[in-house]
Image (cartoon, rainbow, N blue to C red):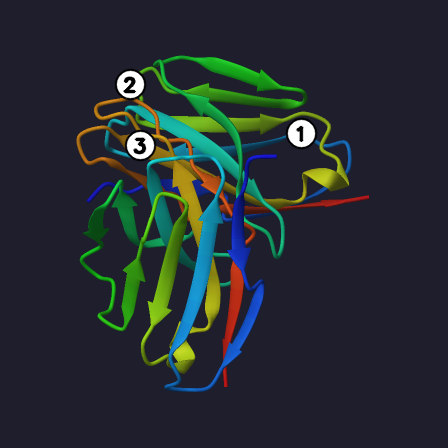
Amino acid sequence: DAMVIQNPRYQVTQFGKPVTLSCSQTLNHNVMYWYQQKSSQAPKLLFHYYDKDFNNEADTPDNFQSRRPNTSFCFLDIRSPGLGDAAMYLCATSRVPAGGPTQEQYFGPGTRLTVT
Amino acid sequence: TQLLEQSPQFLSIQEGENLTVYCNSSSVFSSLQWYRQEPGEGPVLLVTVVTGGEVKKLKRLTFQFGDARKDSSLHITAAQPGDTGLYLCAGYNTNAGKSTFGDGTTLTVKP
């Protein structure tokens, strides 16, 4: 089945120790997103790739970086995790034709990040 | 910045009751999506509404898009424990090229 896969599902890292979360998709969607979600809150968009074009949200800290080496894969790098970065990180994809009226997003299961 | 307000934020009901969740904005959206998220999982798309006044039904769930495409509602009939979860609305604006998520409604249906 076509899907969005996130690895690992659970990640524990130490304060200040760089960590990378990965996302892959078999949907062949052109847009990939990274969200941060804290307990029972709405997902907060960090950045997204429209094809190869990177779009950073204005309030995303510089501590968060992303790479998309090809259509299928996207990575979230947290350079120096702080305690406040503990959260669920969600990857999502969508197929967006330019000017189209809808943006249906397909989410992965998320990676729960713990910072000790 | 486009904002979407969802209400209520929390809702706890007994199995068999009906409920309505609202999603309101002062902005016009090209389309609106509803998602349900279970604990420890990613949100799952339930429906997309595009046309003002549009009504869509998904079993016991009824979704409506406001005539002006600024608001939406989700009505659940005869709620079941399996309906428990976080319900999120997301409005998409073609010009902005991205979606705005509401703050979510946490629904608990007790058996």
Q: CA distance from mark 3 to mark 2?
A: 14 Å
Q: Residue at x 45, y 60 (%)?
A: A22
Amino acid type at image mark 3: Tyr
Q: Secondary structure at mark 3?
A: strand
Pointer 2 residue: B68
Residue topped by disc 1: B18
Q: Do the residues at pointers 3 and 2 share their chain? A: yes
Chain on which label 3 sits: B
Q: Disc 2 is attached to a residue of which chain?
A: B
Distance, label 2 to label 1, CA atoms, is: 26 Å
On the image, the x and y values in percent for residue A35 come to 39, 55
Chain ID at mark 1: B
Q: Secondary structure under badge 2? A: loop
Instruction: Report x, y in % for residue A106.
Output: 47, 38
**Marks 1 and 3, how far apart at CA:** 28 Å
Give the residue at the far right of this rendering: B111
- Residue B89, image quadrant: top left
Looking at the rendered structure, the kind of residue marked 2 is Ala
Quarter of the rendering occupied by the N terminus of chain A: top right
Of badges 2 and 1, nearer the viewer stands: 2
> Front-most of B39 and B65?
B39
Q: Residue B92 shows which numbered tag?
A: 3
Using the image, determine if residue B31 lies above or below residue B5: above
Q: Quadrant of residue A96?
A: top left
Q: Is residue B61 left or right of residue A106?
A: right
**Mark 2 on the same chain as mark 1:** yes
Q: Are marks 1 and 3 in contact (CB under 8 Å)?
A: no
The answer to which of marks 3 and 2 sits earlier in the sequence is 2
Q: Position of residue A47 (x, y in %)?
A: 28, 53
Q: Nearer the viewer, mark 3 or mark 2?
A: 3
Which secondary structure lies at badge 1?
A: loop
Q: Amino acid at mark 1?
A: Asn
